[in-house]
Image (cartoon, rainbow, N blue to C red):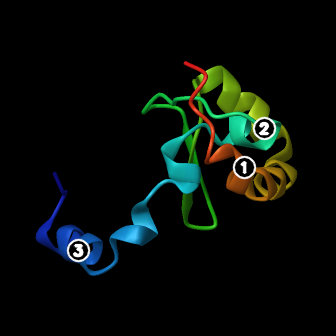
Amino acid sequence: QFASADNQKLFVENPDKYAPQFGGFCSYGTAQGYKVSTQPDAFSVVDGKLYLNYNREVVKIWQQAVPGNIAKAEENWPEVSKMEPKD
């Protein structure tokens, strides 16, 4: 569902822009080297990108060092993406 037809049009034109990072798995978990699911209310938007987390407590941990966590998650993602989720 979209708030407006304009919002829907923007999404249709570039859906990848709105996709969560790291395949929708927990960004902090990815930074730590493992794949874990997320909760829909546990997220951050950084530089226009959506980062999901396991839960809101993990969001607090994630937000303590966002740039470093993003860098580490990006470094780990090629290997983590091949793993089975932990939960």
x and y percent of residue 32 in the render?
81, 36
Asked which quadrant contains residue 7, the reply is: bottom left
Asked which quadrant contains residue 61, the reply is: top right
x and y percent of residue 81 in the render?
61, 48
Q: What residue do we see at 27% from left, 76% from top?
A: 10
Q: What element carries label 3?
A: helix
Going by the image, does 33 lie left or right of 35?
right
Sequence order check, earlier mark of 2 and 3: 3
Q: What residue do we see at 63% from left, 34% from top?
A: 35
Cβ atoms at labels 1 and 2 below 8 Å apart: yes
Q: Which of marks 1 and 3 is in front?
A: 1
Q: Nearer the viewer, mark 2 or mark 3?
A: 2
Crowdedness near tag 2: few (<14), some (14–19) or many (≥20) residues, C-alpha within 10 Å: some
At label 1, which amino acid type do we have? Glu
Cβ atoms at labels 1 and 3 below 8 Å apart: no
Quarter of the image with the C terminus in it: top right
Q: What element carries label 1?
A: helix
The foreground one among 48 and 33 is: 33
Sequence order check, earlier mark of 1 and 2: 2
Q: Mark 2 points at which residue?
A: 33
Q: What residue do we see at 47% from left, 28% from top?
A: 39
Q: Mark 3 points at which residue?
A: 12
At label 3, which amino acid type do we have? Val
Residue 44, labelled with which disc? none
Q: Mark 1 points at which residue?
A: 79
Q: Is residue 28 above or below residue 21?
A: above
Q: What residue do we see at 57% from left, 29% from top?
A: 85
